[in-house]
Structure formats: C-alpha cells, structure tokens
Amino acid sequence: LPVIALVGRPNVGKSTLFNRLTKSRDALVAEIAGLTRDRKYGEGKVGRRPFIVIDTGGISGEEEGIDEVMAQQSFQAIEEADIVFFMVDVGAGITAGDRMIADHLRRNGKSAYLIANKIDGKNPDVVLGEFYELGMGEPLAIAAAHNRGVSTLVDHVMDELLGAEFSEEEPETGYLEDEPAEEEVSHEELDVRGIKIAVVGRPNVGKSTLVNRMLGEDRVVVYDHAGTTRDSIYIPYERFGQDYTLIDTAGVRRRKNISEAAEKFSIIKTLQAIQDCHVCILVLDARTGIVEQDLHMLSFVLNSGRALVLAINKWDGMDAYDKQRVKDELDRRFDFLTFAEQHFISALHGTGVGHLYESVDKAYQSAMSKWQTNMLTRILEDAIASHQPPLIRGRRPKLRYAHQGGSNPPRIIVHGNMTNELPEDYKRYLANTFRRVLDIQGTPIRFEFRQGD
Ligand code: GDP
C-alpha cells in the first residue's frame, strides 16, 4: 500500500483532511500512544484505492520544547512515506514555517504535493499565485472541511504514483549492476507460497522469539529464497507438507546482515503485513495483560478483515492465580471477538506452538473457502424454516437466495425484499447459522443484504 504523510503547520487542516481520507472506510484511526507520540495512522480508501495515511502534529518553524518533539515526528513521518502532502492555508498566506518545511522537502527529494487548503469560495486564480514561490510546483486547491477537491486530489496522485511504479519495472538496458546483491522485489513478484502468516504485536511481546521458534521447529524446512520488500522479509517454508510464508516484520531473519537484525518496530510494516497476509497471529504478553497498544493492533487487524489467531505469550512461569486473571481479562475485554481462537503459549520454550498452527490452518481454510450458491441458499432456507423473519408492518420479508461475494474475508450476500428493514438480531441469527453450518473458524465473515429480486 502506498503511504501518504500529511505535513504542514499546525491548524492548516491536516486532521480534517486525515478524517476525510480515512472516513469512507469506517476507519480505524489509531493513535498509538507511546510508540509514536504524535503520529496518527489510518487506512484510507478513496474510490477503489487503499492507502495508508499518517497525520502529524505539525511543524511551526519556531520549534522549542514540545513543538520540537512534534516536528521530529513530522520528519519521521516524511521518512516513512512514499508521498508527502504538504498542506498550506490559503487564508494565511506563506509563513516562515511553510518555507522551512518546503526547504526540508526539497532537500529530502521525496515526492511531495503542495496542497492549498481552505480554498472555500475563493478564486483559485487570485489566491494561489503566491504559493508557487515555495518551489513545490503547482498548488492543488482543496477545501477539506467541505470535502471539495479531495477525491480529485487522491485520483491525481494515485495516477502519478501507479504510473511511476509501472515505469520502474521496465528493464534497463546497457546497465550492469556492480553487486547483484539481495534483490528487493515488489509484492507481486515475490515467490509466495502457501499460507501467508503475519506475526504482529507491540514491541517486546515476543514476536521475534515466536518467529524463530516457528521456523526453528524440527519438522520445518525453511527454503533458501526469502524475498525482501521495502517493508519485510518473506520467508517460505514447509511444515508437514504444508507450505507457508512468514512475513517477518521484526527483521529476525535478515540473511546477510545479522547486525541489522533487531529492527525498530514499525507501524507501517505492521499495517502492510496485515494487509498482505492470509492469517494474522496477534501476540499478546500474558505478564503485562492487555494494554491500549494491543487494542490498537487488534483494531488494525479487524479493520483489514483478515483471519486472526491470538497468541497469549509468556505463559511459562505464571502461577494459577495470574493465569486465571489473564483469562478473565480476555473474556471481559475481548468478549466481542468471538471468531478468533486463543492460544496460551511460551515462545521461549516452544509450548503451544503446534496447536497454534492448527488454528492458523483452520482459519486459512475458512477464510479462503468457496461455497456454491445452491448450498448457501439451502442453508438460508433451512434457517428461515426454523426461525422466520419477523413481520414488518404486517408483512413478512422474503429472503430469496444467498451467494458468495468473495473470500478473505468470506462475504455472503443475501438477496430478498425488505432486507434493509430486517432487525439486527435476525441478521445476527442468520450470520451465526451460516458460521455454524459452514464451520467457519478464525475469520470474520462479511454479511450483506441486497434489496430486490
Ligand atoms: P518482540 O519485540 O515482540 O520481537 O519481542 P522479543 O521476541 O524480542 O521478546 C522480548 C523479550 O521477551 C525477550 O527478552 C524474550 O526473551 C522475552 N520472551 C519472549 N517470549 C517469551 C516467553 O514465552 N516467555 C518468557 N518468559 N519470555 C519471553
């Protein structure tokens, strides 16, 4: 996924644009406190194109104390991004802070767009002129608060971005590489086989230990052609005849440079890995219990619709009382999360890792299953026969058939009339019935209802 960073002085409208960009997806917007201070990450989708947006506190150009920390965060976000949206305020004109940011971006060489916000009713020909002086090219006018110009902006940028990626793939002729070292390949070119697993979680929960354990098992054969993307290493391996590819966000298995190993935790890597995997293993730390950051990680996974297995790690050496306390806490705080299996493991000693695989395999099968329309329709009919939809204004809704609209996560689409008036608990009843009869485990299901015949 392309990553867009929003930078600019405080109050130019970054948060408003962030909300616009992430809204259409009932976005998860996670502020990962402590990990990133003022950076805010969200997944956005305008039209059909998903991307990641980073919002930053802002750079005022007069940084001291807390502002300086904020500015650092902005610079960090620029580093992480593919594209920078540099926002200025049409009403305020150019300020010293704007000049400083423009300087930084020009030196940095990132592809950056100058976004002139708060155009509102103003005449672009009159008010935009002065912004050329920043040397950032043509200002693109939007009114984030009124949602004007935003989708045009994103389309424009994505077109350019996709164009650029395409041309990169053209073979260069007459060019010899000095060192045909470990090659970075795009996701599409990776030799990925089998079940793609992402092991994610906040720092220190034991991801690296678990990854090493999973790859180090006796019955595991790790193939010698890991693929590297900008974000992660993809490690293909086999276990009991089943192919897997582990997306190693923790950088555990850097083939060449061992000193690079323990790489810094990165939310971008985590988001990319979640997006790209079939099954996500979310690692929690039994010793600390569930903390805010875990919930943010979870919200990333839930938002992606990926299959999910929970690994509650560091279960070794816990006494009975503490174990019960952790289980109670999980029941209480994850009571909404009924589809994901929980495993109590010790990555350090390898306990429970085998069972973890059983859940991963099962979740993968569920997430990727294909069902015939006549089978889904029969399940629907049986469900209706044993429990009819309630009368709505004296009429009984008629549900005609169901078909599958996609996988990972599975989408089941029910067609009928008055479907948009069906009460939630009846929809839930149908969803539960499908889940039970189809034996779907470890993955969310998307249920949709279509009106008409
Ligand atoms: P990461 O940041 O999530 O990759 O976490 P690490 O794998 O680096 O582990 C963080 C710390 O927790 C290290 O000191 C590990 O030795 C320790 N650790 C990891 N798994 C376990 C476990 O199952 N039990 C115990 N007792 N310690 C663990």
Image (spheres, rainbow, N blue to C red):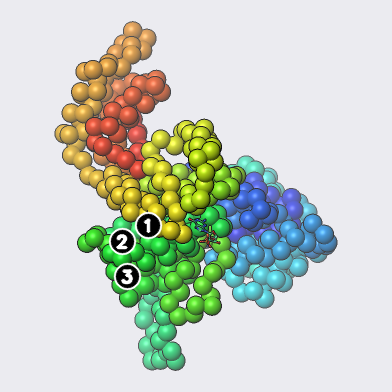
Circle 3: element type? strand
The residue to which callout 2 is attached is 244
Queried on whether the Cβ of the residue with tag 1 lies below 8 angstroms from ligand 1, the answer reads: no
> Is residue 444 visible to the viewer in this orientation of the structure?
yes
Disc marking residue 197: 1
Question: Residue at point 48% right, 51% down?
Answer: 316
- Measure the C-alpha gap from mark 3 to mark 2: 9 Å
Circle 1: element type? strand
Task: Kindly identify the amino acid type of the residue bearing the numbered disc 1.
Answer: Ile
Task: Kindly identify the amino acid type of the residue bearing the numbered disc 3.
Answer: Val
Disc marking residue 449: none
Task: Kindly identify the amino acid type of the residue bearing the numbered disc 2.
Answer: Tyr
| N-terminal label among 3 and 1 | 1
Residue mark closest to the camera, 3 vs 1: 3
Quadrant of the snapshot with the C terminus? top left
| N-terminal label among 2 and 1 | 1
Between 252 and 343, the residue placed more toward the observer is 343
- Measure the C-alpha gap from mark 2 to mark 1: 7 Å
Residue mark closest to the camera, 3 vs 2: 3
The answer to whether the residues at label 2 and label 1 have Cβ atoms under 8 Å apart is: yes
Question: Residue at point 67% right, 65% down?
Answer: 75
Question: Residue at point 58% right, 52% down?
Answer: 41
Queried on whether the Cβ of the residue with tag 2 lies below 8 angstroms from ligand 1, the answer reads: no
Image location of residue 391, percent across then percent down:
33, 11
The residue to which callout 3 is attached is 222
Callout 1: few (<14), some (14-19), or many (20+) C-alpha neighbours within 10 Å?
Answer: many
